[in-house]
Image: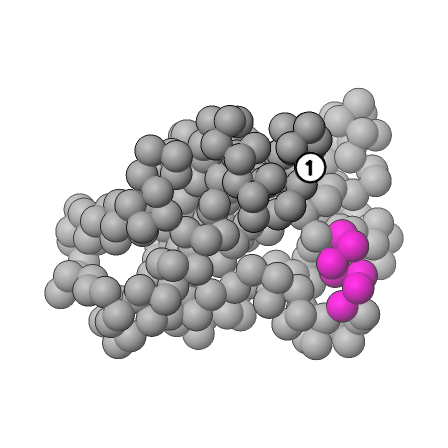
Amino acid sequence: MIIESGRKDMADKVIYCIGRQFGSGGRQVGKALAEKLGIPFYDKEILTMASKDSGLSEALFHNADEKPTSMLLYSLVMGNYPMRSGAIGFNEMPLNDQLFLITSKTIKKVAEQGSCVIIGRCADYVLRDDPDVISIFIHAPIESRVERASGIYEVPADKAEDFCLKNDKSRANFYNYYSDQKWGMCRTYDLSLDSSMLGIEGCVEQIISFTNTHRKHKGTSI
């Protein structure tokens, strides 16, 4: 069965994990995709849920959101990646690392509940063993992203490019630190789309088309 717009009772679960350059419209793509398919959408909602699950302040999760631990530079210099080595216990980890693990548990919990769209937060890596995951990266030329940052996020025009690049760097450091993959590189994702060429709705249609092709290739139906 092929995915149809507005369909809520998909036979097979699909978890869409969307990474995005700042200002590329990746969040808007994810939101539009979720609305079109009638499935849950999770962005910062994940942080609220993780706070409730853990009993920790929601402000802690927002302050650490998609930011690497302060141990990142030391880890890079020493060649030691504590999140992947399992060499230290949970209580010995920096706070950001503990928050990442808690958030990861929340991501796994929502993925178990059915089809959904999850924005950022290494969700594709957290769910790397889930066969129902489709990982997507939304990108665009810096000129397009600057225009979006200035218009939608109200960043001053003379600061918009620097703002986009700094946010990209933070997201890349976060992703590269907590995973063994490279943020933004095409081989990391199942699908990479240029939102400046396709537009928001065009990206949504490409994702839906890819999903059907992907499922057929795997010998499953939706």
Query: Looking at this view, is 209 or 144 the one in front?
Result: 144
- For the N terminus, the quadrant is bottom left
Q: Residue at x 62, y 47 (%)?
A: 153
| Magenta-drawn segment | 58-64
- Using a 10 Å C-alpha cutoff, classify the residue at mark 1 as few (fewer than 14 neighbours), some (14 to 19) or many (20 or more): few
Q: Is residue 59 left or right of residue 207?
A: right
Q: What residue do we see at 50% from left, 69% from top? A: 110
In the rendered image, the vertical position of residue 81 relative to residue 125, given as above or below: above
Residue 43 location (% of width, % of height): 56, 60
Image-based side of 205 in relation to 66, left or right: left
- Which residue is labeled 1 in the image? 156
Residue 128 located within the stretch drawn in magenta? no
Return the residue nearer the eye: 29 or 11.
29
Tell me the residue at 72%/44% (across/down). 67
Q: Quadrant of residue 189?
A: top left
Q: Residue at x 49, y 52 (%)?
A: 27
Majority secondary structure of magenta residues: helix
- Residue 62, magenta (yes or no): yes
Residue 4 visible in rendering: yes
Amino acid type, label 1: Pro
Secondary element at image label 1? loop
The image shows residue 62, relative to residue 152, as above or below, that is: below
Visible residue check, residue 89: no
Q: Position of residue 99 (x, y in %)?
A: 74, 58
Residue 135, horizontal then vertical, whole percent: 41, 46
